[in-house]
Image (cartoon, coloured by chain):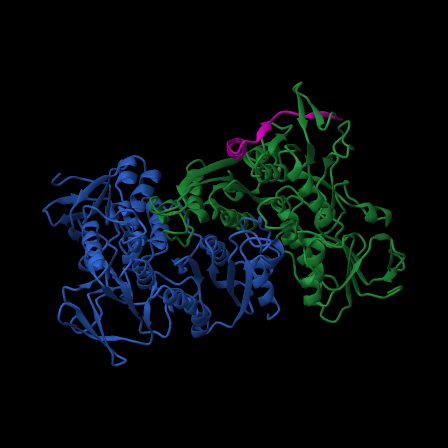
Chain colours: A green, B blue
Amino acid sequence: MSNENFDVVVVGGGPAGIISAVTARKYYPDKKILLIKNTEIGVVPCGIPYMFKTLFKPEDNIMGDAPLQKNNVSIMVDEVVAIDRKVKTIKTKKGQELTYEKLILATGSNPILPPIKGIDQPNVYPIVKELGYLKQLKERVLKAKNVLIIGGGFIGVEFADELAGIAGLTVHLVEFLPHLLQNSFDEEFGIMAEEKLKAKGVNILLNCKVQELKEGKGATEAYLSNGACLRADMVILGIGAVPNTKLAREAGLDLGKGKGIWVDEYMRTQDPDVFAVGDCAGKNDFFTRKDLPVMLASTATAEARVAGSNLYQLKVVRENKGTIAIYSTWIDGLVMGSGGLTEAAAKKEGFEIVVGQAEAPNKHPAAMPGAEKTRLKLIFSKQSGIVMGGQVAGGMSAGEIINIVGMAIQKRVSCTELETLQMATHPHLTAAPTMYPLVLAAQDAAGKI
Amino acid sequence: MSNENFDVVVVGGGPAGIISAVTARKYYPDKKILLIKNTEIGVVPCGIPYMFKTLFKPEDNIMGDAPLQKNNVSIMVDEVVAIDRKVKTIKTKKGQELTYEKLILATGSNPILPPIKGIDQPNVYPIVKELGYLKQLKERVLKAKNVLIIGGGFIGVEFADELAGIAGLTVHLVEFLPHLLQNSFDEEFGIMAEEKLKAKGVNILLNCKVQELKEGKGATEAYLSNGACLRADMVILGIGAVPNTKLAREAGLDLGKGKGIWVDEYMRTQDPDVFAVGDCAGKNDFFTRKDLPVMLASTATAEARVAGSNLYQLKVVRENKGTIAIYSTWIDGLVMGSGGLTEAAAKKEGFEIVVGQAEAPNKHPAAMPGAEKTRLKLIFSKQSGIVMGGQVAGGMSAGEIINIVGMAIQKRVSCTELETLQMATHPHLTAAPTMYPLVLAAQDAAGKI
């Protein structure tokens, strides 16, 4: 394969890379497309916590090559070590030199290693998105009696929930902020998550930092900012990640303010033949245009679709300018979702807002079997009246309710429009039409505008 | 209470009436509001099919007075028999005469009695939204060995599903169109509903009309257009309803083209002090402005919110002009939803369209426990590129997925916007970000535009 020529080369085998390649194929059927990935067998990122108990076997979470093969995308397992943008070639670790017309960087992110003394101990496990690594981690977890998870964001919370379900395993979760999930949810929602995990036996330590990790007798000792010492058989890091921009930096590409590779609305770097998508690419907040440190597979795939379709010509004109943070999670059956700005974030940023709240059963009448409460909070600009954010907690359907909110944010829907929204309701499936939470929350806010 | 004066009088105790009154209270806190209903104990309309088995007892489906009492709305059980618009008074059956400043007609609809010979037999039951009647109907059903349901729309299908779950009861379902649910779904979705009901033991007769009902020995004999004769212990009519416009007609209000009371964008009749909402009010199709024969509690409540807020001044400016048909249903665990135009309806109306299809598991990876397939079909205007309709079939979350589609239709979202939609995804809750059905269906359509 040495010195082979390709039209489109994608660097990275995660969701951003795969969807870039597949979209490129769709829009440019005649191009020769290659995807280079540095792990033989990758995994579905969001499925990682569920490889420990929920999924029957870790292999159920493999990120397969089928979509690439089906779309006639060549695959190479190797690592790109250098880009020469002048002559449009790349070099790989195994010594390949390849040419490209269009290059897409989907190099992802690297887990953060916090500056804790002793963080480099063998008992400390960051989350690496690779099957072999995660299988070993699972074996290790199943032998442990207690585990310390550092970080109370999505990764930490989902790991805590999953591992607490393993019989005989004690889980400690340490978060330095006052509440879990605080970057994505307002306090009252964070508290719901805390209650769920506590009820499942997780030992949650808030406002607390790990200051040092020491290898003790058969266990790791964690010295905490509250003065206590925790002993755990192993430590899992759920602290987040930083954009992997090494390759781009060495190729002289602009890294903006250092939060990811600079890209324009069409995911082009300042070199029009080099695109960047996913965790490695910079993101601008939908409302402020500031850097937004969001790393989500869903964001990555949306960017990949923009890049893949616009490689040779700008075909798909981007209409949603800027990134919204939009997530959902599941904590022992409690579904939580957040989209756009939280109340705290909006206030911190200086927006004048009103908040609308609603609570209703997710089936109707409330006596329908299996009915659960949905709680919804919407954030509106007071003067403009448009919805800027929302948070939901409830049963399974809340996972898609947050996507109704997301659509409303992206379309800058007004409070009035939500008040008079036409929606489908059904006893088995939704709240009553008289109590549909989006409508009620908008009405609640309307009274305050 | 004779000759009492009220500021706002609402006629009708269904969802349209209740939400009109509650919204009026919210926007006009100082007004004296009265709601007159003609049934002592009403029921939640969409919950009626589930009073036969799913709900523990029929009383669980009562439409309670609590929202009215909480909002200081007076309640009167009586029937309005005449309106004098000149002097702004109404007369009731029990002989009351009341004045109003603003009158809201929420008189609902009456079940259709099809012109079948023998339809007036005592063994034939229309669906009447009244607790006492429905309790008797339930007792009757529980004694029956077999029941014939006439009509394969939502009511008929939901009754068939519910009654087929009662041990020892045989259910026959007769529909004169080629498929079930054909007014709201394209054929391939109707077939899914048919398969579900057949698997549950329902005897479905399509392209078939009941021509005569005769009282035979201990059973009703139904003579069908296919020449057969069905014997059933009882017959339930699930054929739909016609607007109840008697009161409005006698008060000289314009009935438009006869499909409901004529109303403007703010639910005002041609008399600015008389509003009409819900089943009794005319509706215009969102895309064509033609009459739209949709009778749904969700539509009714949206209209009620427009009317209630705009009684004395136009406060809440309506932004969604026109009604979309948007429904969901549940057939033995299969969730089906439809919003806007079907492919068949769009073609019949003359729209040049492209269709996008997608199919994906509703959890990811697909090995997550409980994952079910979501099937989504979107209808786009070919030239304008906006979404005009959608249909979904799948697991529980599909009940809210159709509301994402509904929001997209109401906001005239483009195919491009859906292709690059930002959404929340989670292993337990949604399709993978690489396979989110709205995005895939939009991509599929984009290839054809």
Residue A93 at least partly seen = yes
- In front here: B31 or A220? A220
- In front here: A191 or A292? A191
What x and y, as percent, mark residue A257?
Answer: 76, 40
Residue at image position (14%, 49%) is B91
In this rendering, the count of numbered labels is 0
What x and y, as percent, mark residue B403?
Answer: 46, 54
Examine the rendered structure and indicate whether residue A330 appears above or below residue B114: above
Q: Is residue A212 magenta?
A: yes
What x and y, as percent, mark residue B309?
Answer: 35, 44
Examine the rendered structure and indicate whether residue A297 appears above or below residue B26: below
Residue at image position (77%, 43%) is A256
Residue B103 at least partly seen = no
Q: Residue furthest top?
A: A227
Residue at image position (21%, 46%) is B41
Q: Is residue A166 magenta?
A: no
Q: Which quadrant, please, contains the C terminus of chain B?
A: bottom right
**Rendering quarter of residue B188:** bottom left
Q: Residue furthest bottom?
A: B227
What x and y, as percent, mark residue B428?
Answer: 54, 48
Q: Which quadrant, please, contains the N terminus of chain B?
A: top left
Examine the rendered structure and indicate whether residue A389 appears above or below residue B215: above
**Rendering quarter of residue B414:** bottom right
Query: Magenta region: which residues?
Result: A189-215
Residue A318 horizontal side relative to residue A87, left or right: left
Residue A175 horizontal side relative to residue A211, left or right: left
Residue B402 horizontal side relative to residue B217, left or right: right
- In front here: B24 or B264? B24
